[in-house]
Structure formats: structure tokens, C-alpha cells
Image: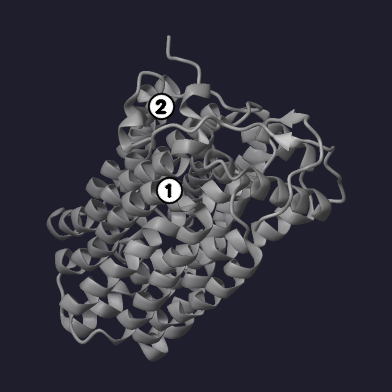
Amino acid sequence: MSGPAAPSNQLYDVEDVIDRAGVGPFQRRLLAVCGLSWAADAAEVLVISFALPAIRQEWGLSPTEAGLIVTATFLGMLAGAWFWGTISDYIGRRTGFVLTILIFAVFGTLAAFAPSPQALALLRALTGFGLGGALPLDFSLFAEFLPRQNRGRYLVILESFWALGTIIAAGLAWLIVPAYGWRPLLATSAVAALLVFWVRVRVPESPRFLVTRGRLDEAWAILERVARANGRQLPPGRLLPIPRRPKVTVAALWRPEFWRITLMLWVAWFCISLAYYGVFSWLPQLFVQRGFAFVQTYQYVFILALAQLPGYFSAAYLVEVWGRRPTLAAYLAASGIFAYLFAAVVGDLWIVAAAVLMSFFSLGAWGALYAYTPELYPTEIRTTGMGWASGMTRLAGSIAPTLGGALLQYADNIVVPLTVWAAAFIVGGAVVGLLGVETRGKPLADTVEAVPKAA
């Protein structure tokens, strides 16, 4: 979108203009668009886990072989996160957002027609390539339209749509798989294609990105649109230009002012993913091994998905009151405690209670992590930083299902795998507590040079 420059020589920093435009109907509509995409992403990631018992039964796969199909999805997501996260700092958030949704919609639907386990693994890897890019782009785009005083809460609320997608995937699995098998469940990916058209119409390019590319008039026109939608009017003026510089590369993530942040994020994302996908990829199987009936497991997985919503909302409150770092560290530690108790306690009530609390805290931790990460990097490298950090999630996610399958196959009980996942949660929380910095109430930087040098 383009428009005339504002008729004044008064210069404004883009952060100040976003604060002046405020939060209102524009951000709520954008939350709906990004949230629906996020829910579709969540359903697409988890639907293969819910289909896995039926896939194993149809093709006679061992737990390790079945785990490789899930691993293929995460390997595709790893490539997608690194590719789309980096390239979207060059081509823009909106373009990357549309393309990634289209990719996972097309290949996710084709996976329903896979004639063999090998074909299914390949199609799921291609689905993951789109998913891996859509996830970091969703958050980076939304973060760049939010004023500093509302950013953390709204980003955690966006992450709460993951629970909606989980509930949808669990509900569909409960209704579809026992009666019709796994293929119709995977075919629901086609719905995501409809999001492409909605996104193209309703999501403008990030004004922060436009400023870093010298497209100041376009950025101002979009900010005026945001202000009008929120019932506000911007003062006459123009955006402060940013001196053009060579394109920033992935190596910038390891500059002196970023290395602690990057190390902390990569470890935290790896640990939470290893634990979360280690548990949730095999959740129906874990319930079966704890003595629950096969069909009954889908009911309990659905209950666990419902427990994620208050987990998100509690984290959304605490990141603004207590702070990003302590909320994330505490929720990761609590996730580890209840993951272990899920294996150790006896009695149906205590087993389900431990699983529910594990789900509550782990998804609250995800929400805090997704809110925290884009605030730690400047606009020039925000999707690069978000993409490479979330790439650690895909790397761990590619390991977790296969490792979980091997541990379940060769261990005498589920205590061993769940102890591994519990330890991963706790290590992630410890690293955040030791290396993290607080970002609550602080402005987003736009250039690498605007970030204070490390002491």
C-alpha cells in the first residue's frame, strides 16, 4: 500500500507512532486473522499424533517406525523455520505469511491420500516446510503492530489459539478416527487454504519492516489506517528514516549484544519442544500404557487440550504483572514437575490431574516464550531470530517422537521417557532464569545498532 507523506517536517520514531495509534479494532481483527492461522497450524502439527495409532494399525508399524513419520514433519518444519524466517527479513512478513499457509494447506491435504508410509513421511515433510515458516512469521507480524504496553498480553493471547487448534484436532480425532480412520482427519488440512485469501485481504505489511526498507510513505499510510480503525488520528508528521546499511545476516544473532539472548532462546526452545512433543506425540499411547482404554484416551486428550486455555490466560496476565522471564522460567519448571508426576502417581484421578497440570503449565510456558522471543531482537533481524530460535524447536521435535518411540519400545514402563521430558522442561527453565533479560514495558528496537552493546 502506498500513500502521500504526512504534510509536516516533524519526525517521529515508528515505535512512538505505533504507541499513538493504540490498541483497538485493528489489532483485534489482526488477532483473529493471525489466531485462526495459528489454530490451523496447531491442528496441522498435532493431527498426525492423533492419527498415529490408526496409522500404525493400518500399516503394521513399530513405535519407532511410526515415530519417523512424525519426525519427517519436524524436519520439514526445521527447514521451513530457518528458510522462511531468514528470507522474510528480505521479502516482507505478509508475502512469507501467505506462501507458508498455502504450502502447508496443499501438502497437508495430499498427505491424506498417501499410498505408503514412505509417501506419507515425504508429504508430511513438505507440509512441515510450510508450517515451520508460518509459525514464526505469525508472531513477528503481529508483534510489530502492537504498542509496548499491550504487547506481551496480546502475544500470549495469540499463542492461546494453539489450544483452540489442539482442541479442534483432538475433537476431530475423537469423532473421525474411530469411525472413519485417519485419512479423513488429515484431509481437514484443506480448510487452511481458505485462510490464504483472508490473509491477503486483511493483513497489511508491517510498517516496521517498511521503515527498515526506506518505504516511509507506505509505512505512514498503514499506520494512519491503523489509527483510523482504532478511532484515533495521528499528528502531522513523517517517520524518522533509518540509514540504509548492508543486509543483516544470521551471523548478527551471535554479535556481542545478542549472543547470550540467542544461546538462551535456542536452549529454551529446544528443551520445551523436546519435552512437549516427546509427551504429546505419544499422549494417546501413554494413556493406554497407564491402563486407559484406547477410545477413552481421545476423551482425556480433549480434556488436556481444554486445560491449556487457562494456562495461556494465566501466563498472559503474569507476563505483564510479574514479567516475561520469571513467568517463563516458573512455568517450565512446573511443567517438568507434573510431567514426572504423570508417570509416577497411581490412581486414575491423580494420573489425569497430573496430566492436566502438565498441559496447563507447558502451554502457558509456550505462550510466554512466543511473547518473549520477538521482543529480544530488532526489526532488521526479528524474523531471522524468531525463525532460527523456533528452528531449535523443530530440531528437537524431529528427535522427540523417534526417541519417545524407542524409549516406549525398550523401557519397561513410561517412567523413563517421562523423566527425560521432565528434565528437559526443568533445564529450559533454569537457562531462562540464568541468561534471560526482562523486556516488559521496553520498546522494540528496529536496527541492530539501536540495541545497547553488551557489557
Look at the numbered disc 1 and give the secondary structure of its residue.
helix
- Quadrant holding the C terminus: top left
Residue drawn at the location 50% of the way across and 17% of the way down: 452
Residue drawn at the location 57% of the way across and 27% of the way down: 439
Eyeballing the image, is 204 above or below 265? below
Apparent side of residue 11 relative to residue 268 in the rendered image (left or right): right
User: Which of 224 and 160 lies nearest the eye of the viewer?
Assistant: 224
Q: Amino acid at mark 2?
A: Ile
- Quadrant holding the N terminus: bottom right
* Coordinates of residue 386 in the picture (x, y in percent): 43, 43
Tell me which numbered mark, 2 or 1, is placed earlier along the sequence: 1
Q: Which mark is residue 261?
A: 2
Disc 2/disc 1 C-alpha distance (Å): 22 Å
**Residue pointed to by mark 1:** 90
Look at the numbered disc 2 and give the secondary structure of its residue.
helix
* Coordinates of residue 11 in the picture (x, y in percent): 73, 29
Eyeballing the image, is 378 above or below 79? above
* Coordinates of residue 227 in the picture (x, y in percent): 80, 48
